[in-house]
Amino acid sequence: MTDAPVNPLRSALFTDLYELTMAQAYLDEGLCAPAAFELFFRKLPDCRNYVLAAGLGDVLDYLEHLRFTDDDLDYLRRQELFDDALLAQLKSLRFTGDVDAVPEGTIVFPNEPLVRVVAPMIESQIVETLVLNQVHFQSVVASKAARVVTAAASRIVVDFGSRRAHGTDAALKVARASYLAGAVGTSNVLAGKVYDMPIFGTMAHSFVQVHDHEIDAFAAFAERYPETTLLVDTWDTLDGVRNVIRLSRRLGERFRVQAIRLDSGDMGELARQSRALLDEAGLTEVKIFASGGLDEYEVERLVASGAPTDAFGVGTRMVVSRDAPDLDMAYKLVEYAGTGRRKTSEGKESYPGRKQVFRTIDSGVMVGDVIALADEQLPGQPLLVPVMRGGKRLPAGNATLEQARETARRQIEALPPELRALPRAAAPYRVDISPALRRAAESIAGG
């Protein structure tokens, strides 16, 4: 007998134990006033100039459905860590708080709040794990994917990473985050269904290998799927291209193959030789799709070399964000019972109070941000918007994936060129702290 699968986005137990032991201690002390927590990251990885925010939709889904089931409560009771008063409170617990956040697809920088949660102390505390989990991973992957899309310079990018993702949920979230960042779709069929996004895929090497002759494999597949992409590198890449040409002559006007796919070898040189063979045979409309070990650096190299590649399938290195797999992201208390709170430990300092970020844009280009107290009125565009009030979503919290994708496109276009480029910019994007926020921080010594 196998255990029934659990959907983490529907389980209140997707939290760290200390969230619940703190909840017990809060209840013991009567600490039940509203608390504000903010999610932010402290610094950029060395190989990043910006972060693309993603994952908010899953956070709001979780908050809307936050419940402890009877089975959950029985499990907690067996741990012998919690008294009946807390378990009774958890039984009736629903998220009743407010959430403000930057819309998905927004470019963000260190110390800028991505999400603010304001709710009674226990509610806002126990959701920490899920909020961090969803926003952190999806923002990491969206940022990586945005770089791949930028490197592709208007050529097609498709997510091919599901099979090497760190779990099934990760594979789905990568498909979504990469589409948000500008990829045109995914190879994952379930992601296509769940997120209503385009799916791509034709054949693998095994389909060719099961035939005695490559051209027979091509002919059989093209008969079933005439407008397909044929994988040409199972045995010898250029012989594979020649077999596509032979197939075109055999089929004549019935030949409708759209592309060939290169999956190994010197992609640039093979693309050039393949293009020459196809063009000489009159197959100028057949595109070249490259995959296999690609990331933004390899894509940029291919594009800069003039390799005639029309599309890229990017998998492992994007799905795990190999060069920057994590952010120093934190979810920290900034206010309790109306009073600002902060952390002052070395290297992990935080600013107190609810905050807003004001962004200045000049001639369509981002020039600087100011992190300020939420009630300040400063020049520029405020980035955080209300997405949930009283546990209920607001219209801004119901943005579609297509709307988030458009936000990301506009945001990336507004980046200064040196920040949009792949190398680390000589000077980071300017983020200032307002004088009022500095004074608020200085007034709280801690301890």
Image (cartoon, grey):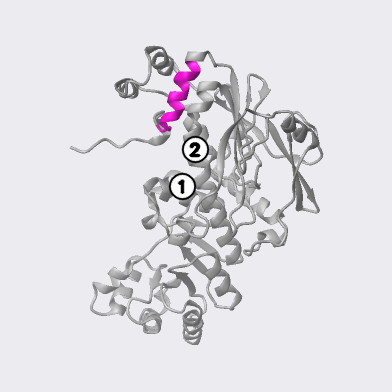
**Three-letter code, disc 2:** Asp
The image's mark for residue 63 is none
Residues at circles 1 and 2 in contact by the CB criterion of under 8 Å: yes
Residue 394 visible in the picture: no
Please name whichever residue, 257 or 238, is drawn nearer the observer in this view of the structure. 238
Q: Quadrant of residue 330?
A: top right
Q: Is residue 89 left or right of residue 428?
A: left
Q: Amino acid at mark 1?
A: Lys
Q: Secondary structure at mark 2?
A: helix
Residue 286 or residue 224, whichever sits in front: 286
Does the rendering let one see residue 303? Answer: yes
Whether residue 440 is situated above or below residue 390 in the rendered picture: below
Label 2 neighbour load within 10 Å: few <14, some 14-19, many 20+: some
Q: Residue furthest left?
A: 1
The numbered disc on residue 58 is: 2
Q: Residue at x 50, y 33 (%)?
A: 128
Please say whether residue 119 is one of the residues in the magenta stretch: no
> Which region is colored magenta?
14-27
Going from N to C along the chain, the mark reached first, 1 or 2, is: 2
The reply, left or right, for residue 359 in relation to residue 83 is right
Q: Which residue was labeled with disc 1?
A: 173
Q: What quarter of the picture does the N terminus occupy?
A: top left
The secondary structure that most of the magenta stretch takes on is helix
Label 1 element class: helix
Q: Residue at x 46, y 81 (%)?
A: 270
Residue 202 in picture, x, y percent from top left: 37, 64
Spatial distance from mark 1 to mark 2, Cα to Cα? 10 Å
